[in-house]
Image (cartoon, rainbow, N blue to C red):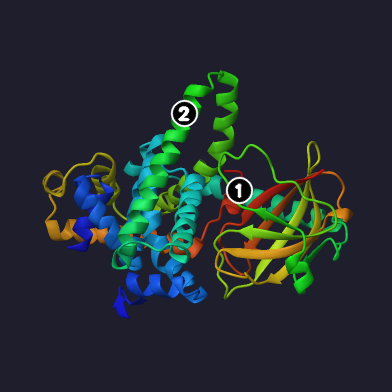
């Protein structure tokens, strides 16, 4: 029965009221929602593949060329990774640090949140600033926080990385940044759940 | 507490009350329970734009949590319905905003630039499923099974007409479809593609 409803929903064959009720059922049953999402992705994947050529539906394609290209790309990626690793400057532990004292918690602060369509980047004040990062965090996990400087023509320059950070709440993670140690420019702060495939959260700010 | 789909499920009323009382673990629980359903609801309304989908899921959860921390909702038992409606409203607002931006800015060059930035997010999401579909199609032993998927998902034919065309019983059709679904899920879960993997492969 569930499968029939899933097929109807994904194919867009439900009426508005029935679809809305089904969506509420998905919110109340995460496993049902996962099944629906796989069905949505299967349909989307088929549509994407068919946009290239329908030949794949008639006979299996030869994958040798694709595999060779993939192997060459992976090798290139590993070499580039090793090169970048050797070129990386030492980290600066005092530029980026965990929040440890009440003085830090009550001092100067800046809030970073993903705001679609925001026209201006937040500005980092001088001195030690508590940066409150807003997102969805799992308090049971460790997070890494990477601070990079964005350079117009030369790409990103790694400034510092902090590992093993815990969220202060399911929607907040806090770190300290010493604004006095940063040159003027645009910076990116990337927060990633450690030992996980989840997408990183990317934020940008300006040091005037 | 009741069990839904093999997982512990905390009713909306209890979640609302605990969040109102400042219980952070209840906020985590709300995210765990609602995120998969919100992804389903918003995937349908974001047209395959993975970046927008992720933004809207996060925005919805933040709005719901902040509302529960503050004034609360009229009927806490209907927390899932409240979250679903919040997601729909945010998706509509986002669509309206995108439409306004299209009308406000009438420069070809700007549109081209915006499209190229957006396409990285969009394509990465679609490619993940597309790669798994390619792998699935390669693995399917019979050409008939591949054609069956095309008829069902792309050509939107109903089961009866597909069975008739391919001289299949409904049971054989359901079995082949169910096998394909299971394998697709397995491929996605085993490979766990990330956007970075795809970009590193030059896709």
Task: Tell me the subunit letter for badge 2.
Answer: B
Q: In the displayed structure, does residue A82 sit left or right of residue A58?
A: right
Query: Is A140 located above or below residue B59 in the figure?
Result: below
Q: Is residue A38 visible?
A: no
The mark lying in front, picked from 1 and 2, is 2
Dot label at residue A74: none
| Label 2: few (<14), some (14–19) or many (≥20) C-alpha neighbours in 10 Å | few
Mark with earlier residue (1, 2): 2
Quarter of the image where one finds residue A117: top right
Q: Position of residue A140 (x, y in %)?
A: 57, 76
**Residue extending farthest bottom:** B1
Q: Position of residue A109 (x, y in %)?
A: 73, 58
Q: In the displayed structure, does residue B202 sit left or right of residue A100?
A: left
Q: Quadrant of the C terminus of chain B?
A: top right
**Which residue is identified by label 1?**
B201
Tell me how far mark 1 sits from mark 2, CA to CA.
36 Å
Quarter of the image where one finds residue B157: top left
Q: Position of residue A180 (x, y in %)?
A: 88, 54
Q: In the displayed structure, does residue A52 sit left or right of residue A129?
A: left
Query: Is B110 located above or below residue A152 in the figure?
Result: above
**Which residue is identified by label 2?**
B100
User: Do the residues at pointers 1 and 2 share their chain?
Assistant: yes
Q: Is residue A88 visible?
A: yes
Judge by depth and name the residue closer to the eye, B66 or B135.
Answer: B66
Q: How many marks?
A: 2
Residue located at (63% from left, 68% from top): A194
Q: In the displayed structure, does residue B140 sit left or right of residue B177?
A: right
Q: Position of residue B106 (x, y in %)?
A: 53, 19
Task: Tell me the subunit letter for badge 1.
Answer: B
Q: Quadrant of the N terminus of chain B?
A: bottom left
């Amino acid at each position: 029965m569930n499968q029939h409803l899933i097929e109807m929903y994904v194919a867009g064959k439900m009426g508005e009221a029935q679809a809305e009720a089904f969506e509420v059922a998905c919110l109340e049953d995460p496993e049902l929602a996962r099944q629906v999402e796989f069905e949505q992705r299967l349909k989307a994947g088929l549509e994407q593949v068919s946009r290239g050529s329908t030949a794949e539906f008639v006979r299996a394609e030869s994958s040798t060329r694709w595999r060779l290209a993939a192997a060459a790309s992976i090798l290139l990626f590993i070499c580039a990774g090793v090169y970048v690793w050797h070129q990386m400057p030492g980290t600066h532990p005092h530029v980026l640090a965990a929040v440890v004292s009440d003085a830090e918690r009550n001092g100067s602060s800046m809030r970073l949140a993903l705001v679609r369509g925001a026209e201006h980047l937040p500005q980092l004040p001088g001195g030690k600033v508590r940066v409150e990062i807003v997102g969805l965090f799992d308090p049971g996990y460790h997070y890494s926080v990477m601070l990079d400087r964005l350079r117009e023509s030369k790409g990103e320059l790694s400034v510092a990385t902090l590992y093993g950070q815990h969220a202060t709440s399911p929607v907040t993670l806090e770190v300290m940044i010493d604004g006095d140690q940063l040159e003027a420019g645009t910076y990116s702060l990337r927060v990633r759940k450690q030992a996980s495939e989840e997408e990183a959260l990317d934020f940008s700010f300006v040091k005037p | 507490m009741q069990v839904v789909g093999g997982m512990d499920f905390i009713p909306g009323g209890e979640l609302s009350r605990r969040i109102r009382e400042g219980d952070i673990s209840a906020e985590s629980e709300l995210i765990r329970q609602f995120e998969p359903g919100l992804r389903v609801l918003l995937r349908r309304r974001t047209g395959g734009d993975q970046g927008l989908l992720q933004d809207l899921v996060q925005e919805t959860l933040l709005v719901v949590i902040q509302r529960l921390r503050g004034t609360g909702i009229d009927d806490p038992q209907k927390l899932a319905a409240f979250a679903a409606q919040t997601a729909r409203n945010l998706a509509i607002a986002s669509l309206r905003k995108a439409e306004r931006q299209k009308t406000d800015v009438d420069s070809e060059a700007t549109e081209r630039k915006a499209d190229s930035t957006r396409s990285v997010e969009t394509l990465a999401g679609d490619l993940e499923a597309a790669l798994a579909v390619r792998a699935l199609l390669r693995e399917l032993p019979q050409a008939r099974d591949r054609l069956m998927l095309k008829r069902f998902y792309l050509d939107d034919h109903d089961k009866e007409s597909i069975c008739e065309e391919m001289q299949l019983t409904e049971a054989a059709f359901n079995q082949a479809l169910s096998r394909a679904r299971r394998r697709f899920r397995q491929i996605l879960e085993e490979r766990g593609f990330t956007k970075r993997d795809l970009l590193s492969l030059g896709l």
